Image (spheres, rainbow, N blue to C red):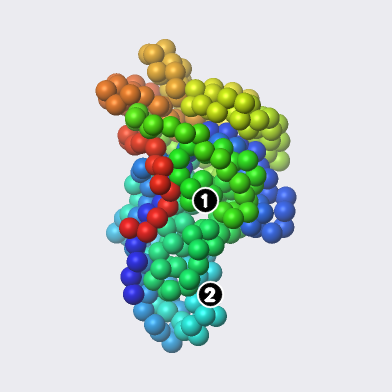
Amino acid sequence: MEAKAFSPGHITCFFQICDAPIDPLLKGSKGAGFSIEHGIITKVQVTPSDHTSIEISINGKVCEARVTETVVRLALDLALQKHGQEYDVKIIQEMQIPVGAGYGASGAAALSTALALNQALNLGLTKNNSAQLAHISEVTHKTGLGDVIAQNRGGIEIRLKPGAPGYGEIDIIPSECNFDVVCGSVGKIETKEVLSNPEKRKRINEAGDKLVKELLNEASIHKLVSLSKKFTMQTGLASPTVIRTIRSLEDSGFPYCSMVMLGQSVFCFVSEKESKNVCNIIKECMPNGIVFVSKIDNLGARLI
C-alpha cells in the first residue's frame, strides 16, 4: 500500500507564542506568514506485519527524523485500533527547502507524512484530523507552533487563534501571486532553544502582541512586510548578516523583504523579471548561503 503527499514550506513573518494550554491541540501561535511552492514530498509504503518497523529516508539517505517518526507512531496506533494490524512503514522524503532555517521543514515533513499515511493505512481521517497528528508532533518536540495550520491551508495567512487545524483559526490575505519569493539562508536558529528561553519568549510576545490587529486593519502584503521588519528589529533575533542583507536589498530598490522566522534567513517579494538581481544581492551578502526562488502556494498540503 502506497501513497504520496506534498506540503508547502512556510515562512513566518511575525508571531506570538501561545503554548500555555496542556492540550497540544490548543497550543500554537498567533501571527502571520505565507506558504511557498517549495516544500516536501513524502511517499509512504506500508506492509502488514506481525511487528512494527519504521524506516525514514530523506533525499536518499536513511536517517533519524523525530518529528516525522512521532507522526508515524501516532498513525500506527490509530491503524492498530481500527484494523487490529501492525505494519512495516517506509517513509521516503524529498526535501526542497533547508532544514532549521525557518521554512517550516519539520512541519511540512510531518504534515505530508500524516496525509500520506491516512491514505495508505485507510484511517478515514479528514484533512484537519490528519494534520492534527503533525501539529501534535511539532509542539511536542518544540520544533514549531503555527506552521502546520498554515501549511494545511496555504496562501498568505493571518493566524487569529492558536491551535491545531480544527482548533486554531486563520484568515487569508488575497493575492494574485504574480511575483516571485526569493529566499536566502546562511544558517539555523534552533526553534526549541528560542521557545525554551524566557528572555527571548518575553521579547517575542511583547513585539508580536498587537501586530495581528494591525495587520487586520490593513490586510495587505505591504503591511505584512512592514510589520515583519518591525518585529525583526524589536525582537533582536536577526544576525548582523541578516540585517545587512535586508539593508542591501532596500538600498537596491527592493523594499519588500524581511527576516524569516526562525532562521538566519531572509525573503523578498519581487517581480519575476527582477528575481535574478535579488538573488545576486543576497548571494553577495550570504556568499556561503543557500538562495532559491519560489512562489506563493495557495493550495496547501495535499495528496499527489
Q: Is residue 137 visible?
A: no
In the rendered structure, the answer to whether residue 184 lies left or right of residue 25 reads: left
Who's the residue at 46% across and 62% down the image? 114
The structure residue drawn at horizontal position 53% and vertical position 58%, both measured from the top left corner, is 128
Residue 183: x, y in percent? 38, 33
Would you say 86 lies left or right of 193 here? left
Q: Nearer the viewer, residue 1 or 244?
A: 1
- Residue 234, image quadrant: top right
Label 2 Cα neighbours within 10 Å, binned few <14 / some 14-19 / many ≥20: some
Residue 75's spot in the image, x, y percent?
50, 70
Q: Secondary structure at mark 1?
A: helix
Which label number is shown at residue 148?
A: 1
**Count of marks placed on residues:** 2
Q: Is residue 19 left or right of residue 231?
A: right
Disc 2/disc 1 C-alpha distance (Å): 20 Å
**Residue 251, x across and y down, in percent:** 42, 12
**Residue type beneath disc 2:** Leu
- Residue 214 in view in this figure: yes
Quarter that holds the C terminus: bottom left
Under mark 1, the amino acid is: Val
Residue 54 location, quadrant: bottom left
Give coordinates of residue 236: x percent, y percent: 60, 27
Report which residue position mark 2 lands on. 78
